Amino acid sequence: MALLLLVAGGYRFAGDLYATARNLAALHEERELLAAEVERLKMKLAVESATRLELEQQAAALNAQVAELNGQVKFLMVRKAPDKIVE
């Protein structure tokens, strides 16, 4: 009877070790997948940050052009009708 319990316990221990090793392998695989996903998201964030910076620079340049054109329009309106006040 003791031998039967010892053998059954041994099988259970071996089964637990196999299950633990299998779980560990699954966890390692999941960790690798998650690490790859994190790297992909970091790259996407870097691209989006660079795109945003470029768009902000373009917006600033366009705002400068608008200000310049508004100044030119104001100048031409004053020149054309000097008696009228332009705001």
Image: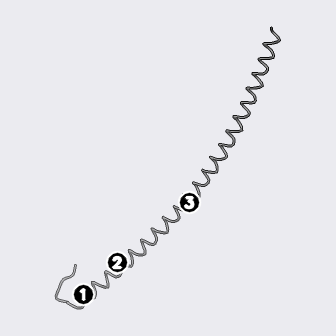
**Mark 1 burial class by Cα count in 10 Å: few <14, some 14-19, many 20+:** some
In the displayed orientation, state which residue is furthest to the right: 3
From the viewer's side, name the closer residue of 86 and 13: 13
> Depth-wise, is mark 1 or mark 3 nearer the camera?
3
Q: Could you tell whether 47 is left or right of 13 in the image?
A: left
Write the residue at 59% across / 58% down.
43
Cα distance, mark 3 to mark 2? 32 Å
In the rendered structure, find residue 29 and report the number of the disc placed on it: none
In the displayed orientation, state which residue is furthest to the left: 83
Q: Check whether the beta carbons of the residues at disc 1 and disc 3 lie within 8 A of each other.
A: no
Write the residue at 79% across / 20% down.
10
First-in-chain label (3 vs 2): 3
Which residue position holds label 1?
Answer: 77
Q: Could you tell whether 51 is left or right of 66 in the image?
A: right
In the rendered structure, which amino acid carries the disc numbered 1? Met
Which residue position holds label 2?
Answer: 67
Tag 3, which secondary structure?
helix
